Amino acid sequence: MSKYVWGSEETQYFFKLNPEAILDAIDAVGFKTTGRCLPLNSIENRVYEIEVDRPESEIKSPSDNFIVAKFYRPGRWTKEQIRDEHDFLNDLVEAEVPVIPPLNIDGETLFEMPDHKILYCLYEKRGGRNPEEMNEEQLEIMGRSLARIHSVGALKAAEHRIKLTPESYGEANLNYLKSTDYIPADIRESFITICDQIIRESKPLFENMNFQRVHGDFHKGNIILRGDDSYFVDFDDMVMGPVVQDVWPICPGDDQQSIIDRNIFLEAYDSIRSFPYEQLKLIPSLRALRLIHFSAWIAKRWDDPSFKYTFGYFESPNYWYGQMNDLRALLSKIIEVKNPYVY
């Protein structure tokens, strides 16, 4: 059963965005497109590499012949929430943190397709590659870089962004899943019970924690290496959250090597800004909340053909059995961290 939560006309148009409409939108803000439009790897939004005609004096590298256009999924973010993202990026640029901000055209970074109200923004193209396994030096660089991001993030709040809590990422998403038929009937009650326990056990852990602007999805796929430089991208999921939310995805395991890597990362972080080590006990909760959020994220978009293609396993019972087993294991860890001698 599909219960798509967003609207009809804009959403259907978004699913079927075509090159002509895309190029018209880019031309409308002052660029001269050549007709070349290449879709990039993005499923939440629609992202395209677009060739533009620029004066030779503006071309310093082959990448300057292109811009990247991001068309936001209707209903995901309000204009104010997107502007919170753009403000964070611009604050980071001012602090000389290597991010790729949206292009500012006549004082505006967010644009709207007039007929279908789809919001979009533009970026300079920056080529590079994602890191694979990071060595000690790279972990130290990333630790210092994240500390700089968090130093800027702490300067002011994102007034319209979600606060990452067991209520917002847990209860809200579980309630949505409960309103659908995706969870197999034979484990539905057990699955919901485990999620309820995770949310209940996690709530006290979040009390008195500091919340600030964080990237929200800081993993290796959102880091671009270009020679000796690195850039941090995709702040689309930025939230008001504990800073540890940006630490565990970059060192995601709990085996001995992952713990060693995390310690190297945090030692470098501490050289720039003091890390709140009491937040480490939130990691099992954050991992569990992310799993609940992930399932609801897919469920809410199941009418999008690209989601059915990418996540074809979502309706398989095995997916839900696996999720339940992972959540059960994380519940045990959440209970364990309440022991003051563990963390």
Image: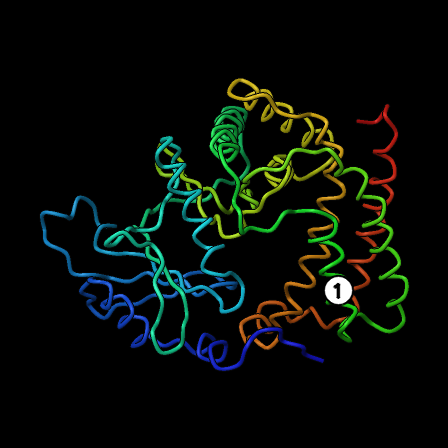
Q: Quadrant of residue 16?
A: bottom left
Question: Where residue 174 appears, x then y in whole percent?
Answer: 76, 61
- Residue type at mark 1 is Tyr
Name the residue that disc number 1 marks: 319
Q: Closer to the camera, 210 or 97?
A: 210
Q: Secondary structure at mark 1?
A: helix
60 sits to left or right of 84: left
117 sits to left or right of 281: left
- Identify the residue at horizontal 85%, vertical 61% (top origin): 191
Quarter of the picture containing the C terminus is top right
280 sits to left or right of 229: right
In the rendered view, tell whether residue 171 sits above or below residue 207. below
- Identify the residue at horizontal 24%, vertical 61% (top origin): 51
Q: Closer to the camera, 196 or 334?
A: 196
Quarter of the picture containing the N terminus is bottom right
Circle 1: is it few (<14), some (14-19), or many (20+) Cα within 10 Å? some
Q: Quadrant of residue 120?
A: bottom left
